[in-house]
Image (tube, rainbow, N blue to C red):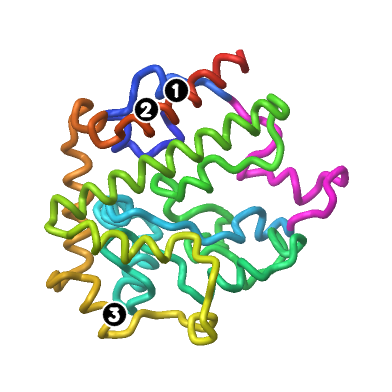
Amino acid sequence: KTSLPQVYSKFLKDELLKIDIQETKATCHDCLRSRDGRFEYLYKPDLKCCTFFPFLPNFAVGGIIHKKLSGASTVKHKILNQEFALPIGLYPSLKYQYDFKIKAPTDFGVKKNLLCPYYDQENSNCSIWEFRGTVCTTFFCRSDYGKKGLQFWDNLNEYLSYVEIALAEECMVMLDFSPRDISDQLVFMNKQDFTIKEETQKKLTDQQMKSYWNGYKSPEDFYLMCYSLVQGLTPKQFKEILGQKGIALEKNVLDLYKTLK
């Protein structure tokens, strides 16, 4: 419960929120992989596993702005500069996605050009911690619970990724975006094929912004509305949004957790 955005506590199952799994070996504050020679290679201690740029769903962007987290200024800068701020959420640029795709396996945790823009280098921590990406919430290079522990985190990542996209899409539907509008924006999720122009694209053009934003003039206000909408969801509404697939993913998490006890 303390690892997830507080907004989730209003509608996630108590059984899931009460999961008590403590990872003591791999922590953000004392990077195991920057000092344990048993790994194939070591991360740089000032970068750690933060050489990853997470997607932030619209309601999370709104939460960061609403709560005035220290990373809110970075988020606002990206919105103002049209750095892939879309109604569904805030994406890493196509250039970043391309650079991440072509990196060597040993570049992760090592190459500074891959460092997350929300990483606070002065304090060596995350500036948007409460609303950090799902991958950031569930990634561990080693688990106190062995292979089953790593599988648990993988399952939780799959579930939470589904949840955040389902909620982001619901916000868009409630704010008058069509299924086609949504699908046009999901193409930026985990993109694999890039044109030569996309390999270096850091921002959206004015024309792209106009086509994606459906008449909304203030992305910041839109994100705040999304945060408010998600905050107001009831457990019953959340269950309807999840559907059978989401419920099945939730069950996988709970079933695997029981094997760790």
Point out residue 50 in the picture as x, y percentages from the top left corner.
59, 56
Real-space CA distance between mark 2 and mark 1, rounded to the nearest whole angstrom: 6 Å
Which residues, given as a range, are shown in magenta? Answer: 22-43
Residue pointed to by mark 1: 251
Question: Which of 180/176 is in front?
Answer: 180
Residue pointed to by mark 2: 247
In the rendered image, the vertical position of residue 210 relative to residue 44, given as above or below: below
User: Is residue 182 left or right of 187 when viewed as pictured?
Assistant: left
Residue pointed to by mark 3: 208
The residue at 54%/33% (across/down) is 155
Point out residue 242 in the picture as x, y percentages from the top left corner.
30, 34
- Verify CB contact (< 8 Å) between mark 2 and mark 3: no
Tell me the crowding category of disc 3: few under 14, some 14 to 19, or many 20 or more residues within 10 angstroms, Cα based.
Answer: few
User: Is residue 188 left or right of 40 when viewed as pictured?
Assistant: left
Give whichever of discs 3 and 1 has the lower sequence position. Answer: 3
Real-space CA distance between mark 2 and mark 3, rounded to the nearest whole angstrom: 35 Å
Quadrant of the rendered image containing residue 230? top left
The residue at 20%/26% (across/down) is 236
Secondary structure found at label 1: helix
- Quadrant that contains the C terminus: top right
Quadrant of the rendered image containing residue 179? bottom left
Question: Which of 157/115 is in front?
Answer: 157
